[in-house]
Amino acid sequence: MKRNLQTLVLAFLLVLILGCTKAPDKVQENVDDINKINSTGSNIFFNSMQCVIDPWQKWYEEGNIKFIKAPSDEELITAYYSSIELTLSDVEIIQREGMTCQACEICPKGYYVSAYTNDLARAKELGWNQK
């Protein structure tokens, strides 16, 4: 009986130890897959201009989408571009450092939008630039 218990405990420990050592391999495979996907895309940015309503703001103001609660700028940008078949990820509003000019339609606003996409050609058609 004691030998069977020892064998059972040893088998349990082996399964536990070997099972735990295999998990990082699978995690690393998932990380590698994500990196492979990301390596095919592009970092992009959008310059918002003084006195010009950004397309996602116009879309939201026209009531083309309803949110349960007011969306963040990043959520709104992601939703807008998704609606016109451009998938963005890692959307971020970046504040510009220093002063900006105030001339309408010539000068950028005090921020720009940074994002990541797998469809650079479509993004460029919609006014985005590659970083």
Image: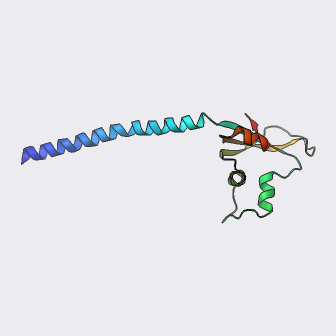
Picture coordinates of residue 6 (x, y %)?
Answer: 13, 43
Quadrant for the C terminus, please. top right
Q: Residue, x 35% and y 38% (percent of image)?
A: 22
Q: Is residue 10 left or right of residue 79?
A: left
Q: Is residue 84 left or right of residue 13?
A: right
Picture coordinates of residue 8 (x, y %)?
Answer: 16, 46
Q: Residue, x 55% and y 34% (percent of image)?
A: 36
Residue 99 in the image: above or below residue 69: above
Picture coordinates of residue 49 (x, y %)?
Answer: 85, 45
Residue farthest along the left direction in this orientation = 1
How many marks the image carries: the answer is: 0
Q: Quadrant of residue 89?
A: top right
Q: Looking at the image, which is closer to me, 47 or 122?
A: 122
Q: Looking at the image, which is closer to me, 105 or 6?
A: 105
Q: Residue, x 77% and y 43% (percent of image)?
A: 112
Colouring rule applied to residues: rainbow
Q: Looking at the image, which is closer to me, 122 or 129?
A: 122
Residue 29 in the image: above or below residue 68: above
Q: Quadrant of residue 14?
A: top left
Q: Residue, x 90% and y 40% (percent of image)?
A: 101
Q: Quadrant of residue 37?
A: top right
